[in-house]
Amino acid sequence: MPLDHRRLRGPEESQPPGAWAAAGEADEDEEGAAAPRDPCALRPLFARAGLLSQAGGSAYVELRGGTKVLCAAWGPREPGEPGGAGGARLLCEFRRAPFAGRGPRCRPGSAAEREAEREAAAALREALEPAVRLARYPRARLAVSALLLQDGGSSLAAAISAASLALADAGVEMYDLAVGCALSRPPGPAATWLLQPGEPEERRAAARLTVALLPALNQVSAVLGAGQGAPPDAWAQALRLGLDGCHRLYPVLRQSLLRAARRRHAAATSA
């Protein structure tokens, strides 16, 4: 009997993937309840600039726990409309891969997903604009595109750091790198803020906060918060904790940008 090479023969007995996903979520909940982490501890961050040859600049940022963001940036371009007036424009795009998150998600291309991506792109632009010297590029356009490959929590903060790194890698003049740091507060009167929460922690959070900082200037470029159940003093404490986290992440991004510049210089010298 001839073999059908176009058909993938599976086992006679199989189980739906949802059963394994539910078991994994239960294990995560049990681990999180049994071993609470230090609220001031940062998740280890990996950053690499200069990955994509098709873009003017690019960066990849990954947080331990499953957050992965890839960003591409393009330097000054001609304005879309000839004869258009006004200063430079920073165009930001945020997209979420269909396989980025676990569990149910919005239908690809649906109105809810487009609205969520539009809000994330607006937040990304708000955090990046104070860091870019737009006055140096009159009537030009700068473009940034962020792709969320895997959502393991603190995705917007990771996208801010990656997009800033990509702009710097593209040679765009900037005042400083914009470093993003996220926080979440679980429900309860005695709950404390957690730095760089994971996806399960964000899902159970009663309040969230994302801070973007220009560390060299000590200037806050964006503060994005949502939630309830926390007094004003608690939000002020979260802001101080987020700024401290941005200062601690800053050297990692700087070293990544320096390594990319050295690789580019070595490649140009050898050629």
Image (tube, rainbow, N blue to C red):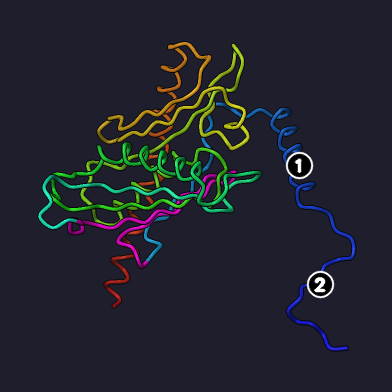
Say above or below: 233 vs 41: above
Magenta region's main secondary structure?
Answer: strand
- The magenta segment is 53-80
- Residue 255 located within the stretch drawn in magenta: no
- Horizontal and vertical percent position of residue 130: 25, 37
- Residue under label 1: 22
Residue at position x 44%, y 24% in the image: 241
Say above or below: 10 vs 74: below
Give the camera-side residue of 54 and 237.
54
Residue at position x 30%, y 41% in the image: 128
Circle 2 packing at 10 Å, graded few (<14), some (14-19), many (20+), is few
Give the camera-side residue of 172 and 247.
172
Q: In which quarter of the image is residue 264?
A: bottom left
Mark 1 element type: helix
- Horizontal and vertical percent position of residue 100: 56, 50
Mark 2 element type: loop
Circle 1 packing at 10 Å, graded few (<14), some (14-19), many (20+), is few
Q: Is residue 243 left or right of residue 208?
A: left
Q: What residue type is labelled 2?
A: Arg
Residue at position x 27%, y 36% in the image: 216
- Residue under label 2: 9
- Residue 76 located within the stretch drawn in magenta: yes
Tell which circle, 1 or 2, labels the residue nearer the N-terminal end.
Answer: 2
